[in-house]
């Protein structure tokens, strides 16, 4: 009995101190309006904790004059009321004070949401994310059903953290729970959905948010047929028959009412490539790719310009003289830099490289082949495969480092776990460093210490570390062919097989049968041109292999880029108007983002039974 009285007095003291602090010091100045736009709070269950009829101060006064257990809900309501009054620091302060008094999981969940809400309004996104993680723990451990506000905040927080898939998943769940949705809410969801890459859409579908089947079908139609309006509209009509009550009907009605997409007549294309000098081979291969796509099109004239022999300042006059409608190139980064510095160059251009220190103009579009993008795709996809402890083995060069760091950062953003990166050089120590990364060396040292103490021979086997369940390997095809078998050998027979994944940097079309056997099980991302799949132009690939059987992998990629660039020129104006339009090219499934960058979705391949096969990793 004495213990219960002491406990009650402690509660009373905390509550009284909280109220007194507010009444005497007023805690903090009134906060400004939210810095981050979020959905209004007063919906569904949140109406119980946010009301305009009673002020936060009144809730605090009431809490000071009743029994401690009865005061806890009032303090929670006071925190919610401060949120409604846009006094976010006070709301957070009260929520923090009441946290020490909470008695049940439902209250813990409620306060975590209030803290997250205040932190979002104060632009403390990472702290807000931690509170949402606490709410998720209560959902998993105690069966607390997620509130509408949880999903609204989750959508905002993950978007700020640039995790668009998680953000959209939360938005779709919030939409299905909200009884007060508007046409504007549907438009916002469609705007976000239509900008997803192909691989991002696949990842979102795997999370199974409400209505995703219908949305996926609209997007797939848009991806493939959005630039052919009559055909696209026929498919949308079929969709409406299948999904008569789906919220996407509002979007389809708007799409059908739009006038025909405006397309620009393109008769003359200037192509700027290095057709001489050290990089002549790259320029010639890009030229061959463009010519393969051109296929003697009588409606278009190509004008090839050697980037190493032209004065960039004279190009506007050349364009005007030849009635150039569009430019493809330049290809090399230095040439792109010089091209972007041409004053008053208003000719629409598809750049084949990126100059990081010179901004593009509105009439410029760049085809990005950044390998960091595929690392982000790989990390996002693999983190959903129930892997928890990846390790990254990376060559110690600039390209490999960028890939490794991009993979690790994306993994951390999604899982809040930092993968270890182990760098190695192209030398005799390469395998030694890998062994250390797997802790095989330490295992062998332990065996030697045991053997030195026991004067008889014992059968031993070194074991790899057990806190790794996935390896992401970043390196050249040569390094990969050396390391992959070595990893397999050093995985203990007492351990589960650790799957190995890689970027396209590790894949080569020139490995022979014995080398493919050594690479068995390796899974990697790759462009359609270098992976037999439904997206590969097989007839062209066979012709290319016949004409240039010794062409390197890097030149193969440039050929594919040249091939895609010609087709993209005719499509870019439509892609600018409708962000759901995609190009299914040989470099990947391409979309145009808000920064006028064409980014890619890549395929997944795997070495199986001496062959390379496309796989569906989802």
Image (cartoon, helix red, strand yellow):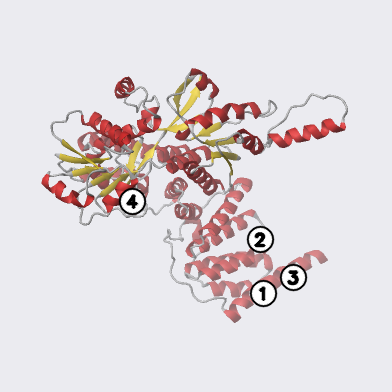
Circles 3 and 1 in contact, beta carbons < 8 Å: no
Residue 415 % position (x, y)? 56, 46
Q: Which of 599 and 275 is in front in this view?
A: 275
Label 3 environment density (alpha carbons within 10 Å; few <14, some 14–19, many ≥20): some
* Cα distance in 3D space between marks 3 and 4: 60 Å
Q: Mark 1 points at which residue?
A: 16
Q: Name the residue under label 3.
A: 9
* Cα distance in 3D space between marks 3 and 1: 10 Å
Q: Is mark 4 on a helix, strand or loop?
A: loop
- Quadrant where the N terminus is found in the figure: bottom right
Q: Name the residue under label 4.
A: 595
Which badge, 4 or 2, comes first in the chain's sequence? 2
Residue 281 % position (x, y)? 32, 33
Which badge, 4 or 1, comes first in the chain's sequence? 1
* Cα distance in 3D space between marks 4 and 2: 47 Å
Q: Which of 166 and 9 is in front in this view?
A: 166
Q: Is mark 1 on a helix, strand or loop?
A: helix
Question: Splitting the image into 4 quarters, where does residue 327 fall?
Answer: top left
Q: Is mark 3 on a helix, strand or loop?
A: helix
Residue 92 % position (x, y)? 56, 66
Residue 102 numbered tag: 2
């Amino acid at each position: 009995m004495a213990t219960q009285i002491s406990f009650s007095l402690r509660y009373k003291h905390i509550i009284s101190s909280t109220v007194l602090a507010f009444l005497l010091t007023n805690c903090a100045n009134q906060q400004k309006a939210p810095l981050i736009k979020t959905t209004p709070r007063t919906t569904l269950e949140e109406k119980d904790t946010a009301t305009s009829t009673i002020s936060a101060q009144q809730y605090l006064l009431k809490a000071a004059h009743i029994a401690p257990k009865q005061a806890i809900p009032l303090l929670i309501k006071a925190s919610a009321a401060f949120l409604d009054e846009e006094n976010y620091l006070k709301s957070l302060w009260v929520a923090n004070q009441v946290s020490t008094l909470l008695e049940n999981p439902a209250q813990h969940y409620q306060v975590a949401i209030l803290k997250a809400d205040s932190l979002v309004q104060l632009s403390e996104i990472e702290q807000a994310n931690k509170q949402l993680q606490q709410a998720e723990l209560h959902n998993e451990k105690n069966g607390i059903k997620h509130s509408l506000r949880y999903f609204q905040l989750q959508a905002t927080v993950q978007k700020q953290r640039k995790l668009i898939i998680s953000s959209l998943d939360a938005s779709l769940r919030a939409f299905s729970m909200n009884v007060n949705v508007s046409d504007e809410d549907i438009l916002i969801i469609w705007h976000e959905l239509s900008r997803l890459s192909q691989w991002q859409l696949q990842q979102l579908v795997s999370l199974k948010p409400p209505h995703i089947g219908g949305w996926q079908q609209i997007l797939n139609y848009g991806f493939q047929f959005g630039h052919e309006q009559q055909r696209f509209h026929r498919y949308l009509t079929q969709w409406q028959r299948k999904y008569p009550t789906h919220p996407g009907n509002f979007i389809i009605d708007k799409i059908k009412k739009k006038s025909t997409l405006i397309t620009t007549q393109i008769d003359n294309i200037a192509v700027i490539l290095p057709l001489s000098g050290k990089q002549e081979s790259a320029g010639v291969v890009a030229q061959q790719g463009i010519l393969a796509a051109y296929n003697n099109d009588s409606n278009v004239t190509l004008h090839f310009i050697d980037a190493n022999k032209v004065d960039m300042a004279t190009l506007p006059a050349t364009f005007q003289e030849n009635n150039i409608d569009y430019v493809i190139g330049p290809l090399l980064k230095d040439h792109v830099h010089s091209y972007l510095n041409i004053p008053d160059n208003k000719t629409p251009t598809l750049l084949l490289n990126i100059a990081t220190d010179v901004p593009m103009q509105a009439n410029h579009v760049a085809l990005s082949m950044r390998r960091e993008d595929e690392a982000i795709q790989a990390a996002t996809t693999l983190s959903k495969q129930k892997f928890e402890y990846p390790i990254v083995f990376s060559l110690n060069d600039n390209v490999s480092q960028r890939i490794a760091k991009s993979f690790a950062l994306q993994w951390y953003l999604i899982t809040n776990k930092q993968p270890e990166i182990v760098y190695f050089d192209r030398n005799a120590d390469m395998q030694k460093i890998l062994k250390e990364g797997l802790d095989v060396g330490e295992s062998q040292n332990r065996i030697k210490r045991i053997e030195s103490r026991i004067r008889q021979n014992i059968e031993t086997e070194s074991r790899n570390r057990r806190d790794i369940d996935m390896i992401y390997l970043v390196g050249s095809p040569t390094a990969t062919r050396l390391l992959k078998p070595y990893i397999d050998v050093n995985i203990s027979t007492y351990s589960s097989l650790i799957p190995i994944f890689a970027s396209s940097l590790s894949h080569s079309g020139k490995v022979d049968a014995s080398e493919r056997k050594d690479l068995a099980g390796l899974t990697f991302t790759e462009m359609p041109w270098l992976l037999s799949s439904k997206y590969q132009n097989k007839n062209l690939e066979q012709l290319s292999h016949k004409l240039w059987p010794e062409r390197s992998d890097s030149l193969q990629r440039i050929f594919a880029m040249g091939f895609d660039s010609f087709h993209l020129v005719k499509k870019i104006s439509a892609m600018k108007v409708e962000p759901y339009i995609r190009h299914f090219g040989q470099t990947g499934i391409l979309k145009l983002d808000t920064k006028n960058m064409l980014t890619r979705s890549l395929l997944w391949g795997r070495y199986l039974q001496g062959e390379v096969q496309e796989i569906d990793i989802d």
